[in-house]
Image: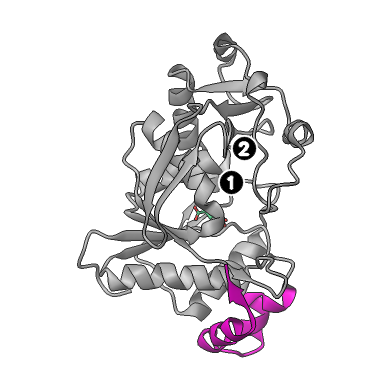
Amino acid sequence: MSAPTSSYRGRIAPTPTGYLHMGHGRTFHLAAQRAEDAGGELLLRIEDIDEARCKAEYTESVLKDLTWMGITFDREPVYQSQRRETYLSAWTQLKDAGRIYPCVRSRKDVAAATRAPHLEDETAEPIFPVEWRPSRDAADEYEAPGCVNWRFRVPDGERVMFEDGRLGECGYTAGKEFGDFLVWRRDDVPAYELAVVVDDAEQAVSEVVRGEDLLLSTARQLLLYRALDLDPPAFYHCALVCDSEGKRLAKRHAALSMKERREGGQSFADALAELMTRYTLS
Ligand code: GLU
């Protein structure tokens, strides 16, 4: 990108747990475009916090995908796997403020208890049953995370509102559309919601551009910004690319992997144009 002429700062934050598909490519392209149009900066953050699921070969592939797309960055990439201490201090801050609690229930328990066939989005989290919240005192027994899950206690009934750059006003009710969510996992990995808030705030990202599958996460994250006394960025959620059955693209749509396209000698522009003729937007 050319030298920034404004205070806009965007970021691209891929998770290297597989080869990325053209749907990611479209979202990244829009993120780069918005930074460029604003005369701002664009950062790259590799969200490799879950070291058991992330692989170096996927990170390498992501970097090649971005080069193939013609996207360049203003700074060296940031790797979440190297930032544990920073997430740990956010965990301590939340714990000391009584905002999070240790929870012995697994994700499986929650899924079984709520059995949520109504959830259209296969990635949506079932809502944590409020009667499973333990007493506030339990947190004092722990000096470090790990061993148990840690959840953020949401303000039941509060409607978390935000202005989305594409969709306009959005709002989700805590305790109804989303429940107490993970901030630290019992396998001692910081949860996505915590890591992303800490990073976006520390990197002074002014606008987060990502897929609209993360709209509910934005509501959760806004609660974390508030609890950590951090300023939230603006948000712009992109439409998702869907196949003929209305299912959004996933890493399983192998033919649409960016790796395959670039290795096949296609240009990103051609691959994107082809995608838009064969697939629809959410
Ligand atoms: N790393 C996340 C993902 O690949 C995106 C996070 C974000 O943009 O906030 O789904």
Q: Look at the numbered discs 1 and 2 and tell me whether their residues touch, using CB distance below 8 Å.
A: yes
- Residue positioned most to the left: 5
Residue indicated by mark 2: 189
Q: Quadrant of residue 190?
A: top right
Specify the amino acid type for callout 1.
Answer: Ile
Expressed as whole percent of the image width and height from the top left, the position of residue 238 reads 48, 64
Q: Which residues are magenta?
A: 254-282
Task: Determine the residue positioned at 58% across, 28% down.
Answer: 151
Q: Residues within 10 Å of mark 1 (few under 14, many from 20)?
A: many
User: Would you say 38 lies left or right of 19 here?
Assistant: left
Q: Which mark is residue 49?
A: 1
Please, is residue 103 above or below residue 280 in the view? above
For mark 1, give the secondary structure: loop
- Residue positioned most to the right: 112
Front residue of this view, candidates 222 and 142: 222
Dominant secondary structure of the magenta stretch?
helix
Image mark count:
2
Front residue of this view, candidates 268 and 132: 132
Task: Determine the residue positioned at 51% across, 28% down.
Answer: 154
Q: Is 214 colored magenta in this rendering?
A: no
In what quadrant of the picture does the N terminus appear?
A: bottom left
